[in-house]
Amino acid sequence: MAVQAQQETALEDSLRDREIGVEQEHLDRVYQRLEEKIHEAEFLMNDAAKRGQVGTPGALAERDAQVFRAGVHLNRLNNEFEDFLFGRIDLLRGKDGKKGPDGAYTAVEPAEGAVRDDNTADIAETLHIGRIGVLDQDYAPLVIDWRAPAAAPFYRSTPVDPGRVVRRRVIRSKGRRVLSVEDDLMRPELKAFLGGHELPVIGDGALMAALGQARSHTMRDIVASIQAEQDLVIRAPAASVTYVEGGPGTGKTAVALHRAAYLLYQDRRRYAGGILIVSPTPLLVSYTEGVLPSLGEEGQVAIRAIGSLVDGAEATLYDSPSTARAKGSHRMLKVLRKAARGALELNDSPTRLRVVAFGRRLELEAGELERIRHNVLGGTAPVNLLRPRARKLLLDALWAQSGGATRHSDPELAAELRSSFDEDVTSEDSFIAFLDAWWPELTPKAVLAAMADDRRLGRFARRILNPGEVRRVARSLKRDGHSVHDIAMLDELQAILGSPARPKRRRELDPLDQLTGLEELMPVREESQRERAERLAAERTEYAHVIVDEAQDVTPMQWRMIGRRGRHATWTIVGDPAQSSWSDVDEAAQARDEALGTRPRRRFQLTVNYRNPAEIAELASKVLALAMPGSTSPSAVRSTGVEPRFVTTNKGHSTVVGDSLAHTVREEAARLLDRVDGTVGVVVAMQRREEAVKWLAGLGDRVVALGSLEAKGLEYDATVVVSPAEIADESPAGLRVLYVALTRATQQLTVVSGERDEPDATGVPDLLRD
Ligand SMILES: Nc1ncnc2c1ncn2[C@@H]1O[C@H](COP(=O)(O)OP(=O)(O)OP(=O)(O)O)[C@@H](O)[C@H]1O
C-alpha cells in the first residue's frame, strides 16, 4: 500500500515538473519577446532624441510625443517584468470564430460538436493571461492582458457554467522562473486532449492557495484568482452608478481596486488621472495603495482617505461618537450656513463708516450698516463673492447722503459725477480699511475656529443642535488639529464661502522658450509620468469616476463633500450596511442619493467570504444577528479546523497567569505571533488605543494595536479582540463595529473578556453566546 502511495506521489511530482517545464518554456519565449520590445522602445527613444536636434517647433512637438510614448512603453514593460504572467486557460473550439484586437478568439460558448458524444474533446486554443498583453512577431497572442475580453473566461468560468474553458491554470513564478502551477478543472466530466495527450491536472486550485497565504501589512492583488461574481463587478460598464454590497471579506475593496485598473484599460483617455478612490482611513490607504501599481497602473488613480480630501487640511483627531454624530449629520449644513454669514461680524467688525468725499464728511451708522449687510446676505450666494455687492450698496448709501444725485438733471453728467464720487471714496484708505474689516474674505478654517466659542456656536445652531451638542462640538473645535468630520465641514464651508476670482498668475516665460516653442513641452520633459499624474490629480477637484470604499460609513456631510468631486462622474460604490459605524443609516442613504442624483444604479451582491475561515465567520454571525436581525452572513469559502479561543482576565477561567488586561492581551498576542507567519492585529475600543500600543511594546512589527474604528477594511493572519462589550458600548452603532472587529482574521481569533463582558464558565462573553 505504502509502495503504491509512494509511486503515486512520484508520478504526481514528475507530472508537476513536466507541466512546470511546459510553462517555463512559454515564459522564456515571452521574456525573449519582451526584450525585443524593450530594445525597440530604446531605439525609438534614441531615434526621437536625435531628431529632436532639428530644432523647429514642429519637430520638437513630434519628438516630445514620441519620447513620451516610448518612455511610457518602456516604463510599463519594466514594471511588468516581474511575475506578470500568471494564468492560462485551455479552451474548446468556440461558437463564432471572431478574433479580438489581441488576436485571440472571443467566443464564450463552445461550438456545436466541440464535445463529442463520448464526452471527449480536443483543446482548440490555449491562452496565457498576464498583467499586460504581449504579441509575438506574427501578432499572435503570447500573453493576453487580464482586462481584455478574451481573458474574461479565465475569471468567469465556473464548474456550474464553464463556457469553453476546460482547465484553468494559475502559474506562480518569481523573476524568470516558474515555481508552481495550480489547476481547476471546469469540466471534470470531460476527457480532453491537447496535442494528442490527455490534459493533465495539477493541485487543488489557485484560490485556496492564495487564501492560505500569510498576510503582510500591504494588500495583494487578486488578479490570478478573481471569482466569477467579482469579475462581473470589475468589468461592469462604467455608466452611471455601480453599487456593490457584500459582507466582510467578500472582496469589495479588492474588486474596487481591480475595477479602477479595468476602467483605465477600457478608456485610458478618459480615466487616466481621473479616478478617485475614497477610503475611510489612512491605514486602509496605505494597506491598499500597492495594489494598483502591481496591476501596472502607477500614479493614475488618486487613493485618498476621506480625511485628506481637502487640500491643506489633514484629519488627525477623533471625535467622540456623539460629537461625530452632530458634525456628520445633515443638520450641520444649516449651522455652517449660519456660521459663514455670522462670521462676518467677528473680529470686532466696525460699527461706523466715515469718509470724506467731494469735500464733505459722510458717515454711515451701525443701523444703516446692519441693514446693508442684511440686504446683501439675503440670497444663498457665496459670502466671499458678495463683497463687491456690499461695496456697491455702501457707495449707494454714501451717495444718497452726499446729495450728489440732485446736482445734475442731465443723466450723462449725473453718471459721470457718480463715477468720480465712487472713485474718490474707494481710493480713500479709510474706506478700504473699513471694507476689509467689515466684509473680510473669510476662510473655512477661520469660520470653523469661530465656531469653537460656545456662545457663538449656540447662536449659529439655535433650534438646530441641542445645548449638549453645542457644548461638545465647540469643545472639540478648540483642539489643535482636525477630525475626519471637521474636514467635511471645511469643504462645505469652502462651498458656502466661495473663492473670489483672482487674476491668474502667468508662468514667467523664458525668451528662449518663445523662440523654440519649447515652453509647452517642458512639463513633459521635466516630470516623470508618475509625477505628472500625481500633479494632475492634486490639481483636480472633479473626477471622471469616483469609487467609494466602505460606503456604509460615509456621513451625510461627507457624501456632500464626495459628491462635489464627482458631479459629472460615473461611480462605483462598495459597502456593507452591517458594518456601518454611522448611527443613522437612513439619513446617510438619503445624503448618498442626493450626491448621486438621478443616475440609474446597477446593483451587485457579493456572497462569499474569502477572508475568514468558517469557524470565525460563524462566531461573527452571532453578533450580526444582534446588530442587524434578519441579515445573512456571506458563506465562508474555507475552514481551518481552528476554533476561536476565549480568554478572560478573571482568575479561574483563564489558563493565563495574571489577571490584568494588559498582561493577558500581551500574552495572547505573543501566542498568536508564534502560531502564524504573518501579522497579528489587536483590536480594542477606541478609548483604549493608546494604552494598547504600550501593552504590545517590544513584540515586533508583525503585531499592531488598533482602535475598533481603525480596523475597518484591514485584515491580519490572527486577531485578538479585546472586550467585546467595551467595543459594543462605545457608540450607538457599537454592535456593528464589533462585527467589523470580529471579522478581521484570516486564520485565528482570540477573544479576551473583562468582567464587563460577563463571560460564562468557558470564557465566552455574553455577546458571543448563542
Ligand atoms: N478572488 C479572490 N482570490 C484571492 N483572494 C481574494 C479573492 N477575493 C478576495 N480575496 C481576499 O479576501 C480578503 C478580503 O478582501 P477585501 O478586503 O477586498 O474584502 P472586503 O469585502 O472589502 O472586506 P471588508 O468589508 O471586511 O472590508 C483579501 O485578503 C483579499 O485579497
Image (spheres, rainbow, N blue to C red):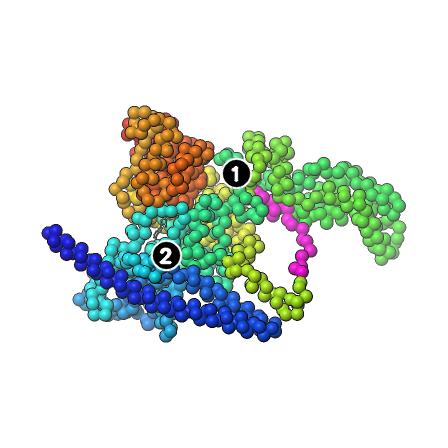
- Dot 2 crowding, Cα within 10 Å, few <14, some 14–19, many 20+: many
Please tell me which residue is depicted at 42% across the width and 64% down the height of the picture: 77
Ligand 1 under 8 Å from disc 1 Cβ:
no
- Decide: is 770 above or below 573: above
Viewer-proximal residue, 525 or 212?
525
Image location (x, y in percent) of residue 494: 61, 47
Image location (x, y in percent) of residue 446: 64, 41
- Residue 611 is covered by the magenta coloring: no
* 518 with respect to 634 (left or right): right
Please tell me which residue is depicted at 44% across the width and 39% down the height of the picture: 709
Q: Which residues are magenta?
A: 489-508
Residue 588 visible in rendering: yes
Q: Badge 1 is on which residue?
A: 317
Viewer-proximal residue, 31 or 206?
31
Task: State the residue lying farthest toward the top.
Answer: 651
* 182 with respect to 149 (left or right): left
- Decide: is 168 above or below 285: below
Residue 374: mark: none
Q: Badge 2 is on which residue?
A: 223
Please tell me which residue is depicted at 27% across the width and 61% down the height of the picture: 20
Image location (x, y in percent) of residue 73: 46, 66
Q: Amino acid under label 1?
A: Leu
Please tell me which residue is depicted at 52% across the width and 60% down the height of the picture: 528
Q: Earlier in the sequence, mark 1 or mark 2?
A: 2
- Dot 1 crowding, Cα within 10 Å, few <14, some 14–19, many 20+: some
For label 2, the SS is loop
* 545 with respect to 440 (left or right): left
Residue 159 visible in rendering: no
